[in-house]
Amino acid sequence: MQNKKALLVLVALLTMALLAAGCGSKERAAVVDKGVEKPKEIHIAYQTSSTVILLAKALGIYEEEFAKDGIEVKYDLYLAGPPMIEAFAGGRADFSATGDMPPVSARSAGVDIKIISRAGYTPKGNALLVRPDSPYKSVADLKGKKIAVQFGSSAHHYLILLLKQSGLNTSDVNLVGLPAPDHQAALASGNVEAVATWEPWSSVLENAKAGKVLADSSSGVKRYLQVFLARNDFAQQYPDIAVRFVKANEKALQFIKTNPDAALELIAKESKLPAPVLARIVRETDWDAQIVPDDVAAFQQVKDFLQETKVLKKDYDINELFDDRYFKQLPR
């Protein structure tokens, strides 16, 4: 019970931080070209798992799209989705790609963001790993053990669902809040017996022979998605910019589909991760950008979970989180 309370307090504190950050939001100055208002710059928030953004950045696709209007593209790197959402709340991010948990909780906390298209569906995207020499053979074997996870991430939700499937809950294990880049050291030192994480971090652990997968999301416990987000007031003020951001992403997505090997090398160089670490996510991900009903259902599952655990500050219809008007304007 104490463990569960600590978990809920930490996630609740995240939503409070988002609200506080939102109070300082300031709209950046815009320029006018032939009567059409345009922003001077756009801020794209990303993380190591933001595969499409990394590729588009490496190919210069965003710069190619916006430089002709004198719009500067700025990139801001974050360790995970929750701090990126905080940047949205503070007006420091205009677009990003994240997993499912951060935007669902953020929307409830009053952060005005919209999911505008999909950034990839990876069946094995979430995973639970143990040390290669670990004696644990099943999730149930981890009862009473320490498991590291980034609180507020998609892996956090995946872990709770996985425990439930195995007849356990958060009070049956000791959850340790830890950023994904620190999981390898925690496993190696024996500070934790397992880690729950997402791609590419699970592949990082496997490639370094620091971890082996005990379970992953391909079993259907949870649908692992990356989605593109837009700050709603920014997108509404500059709808053409939002359409062109989606268009630029589509170019990167098509490049991955038609040139997977070249894409892999570029993403590896941009992320500073070895190509073998990224190979699975590049080759096994469904790169179609259109949101499908199964995706909406996956976000509903997240919202139901946050509601059941009394983390959501305010209820809302999950469809309010989605806005595909910009995607629909792309030529077909």
Image: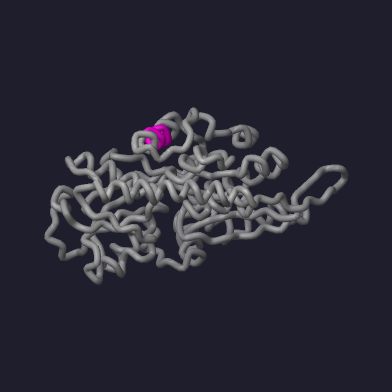
Q: Looking at the image, can residue 255 be seen?
A: no
- Residue 158 on the magenta segment: no
**In this rendering, position of residue 32 left or right of residue 122:** right
Name the one closer to the observer, 163 or 239: 163
Give the farthest residue toward the bottom: 189
Give the farthest residue toward the right: 34
In the rendered view, would you say 151 is above or below 164? below
Quadrant into which the C terminus falls: top right
- Colouring of the image: one colour
**In this rendering, position of residue 25 left or right of residue 7:** right
Q: Residue shown at 15%/50% (left/top)?
A: 138
Q: Looking at the image, can residue 307 be seen?
A: yes
Residue 232: image location, x then y, percent: 63, 40
Q: Residue shown at 32%/63% (left/top)?
A: 183
Residue 206: image location, x then y, percent: 28, 62
Residue 102: image location, x then y, percent: 46, 46
Q: What's the magenta bit mostly, secondary-structure-wise?
A: helix
**Magenta-drawn segment:** 299-304
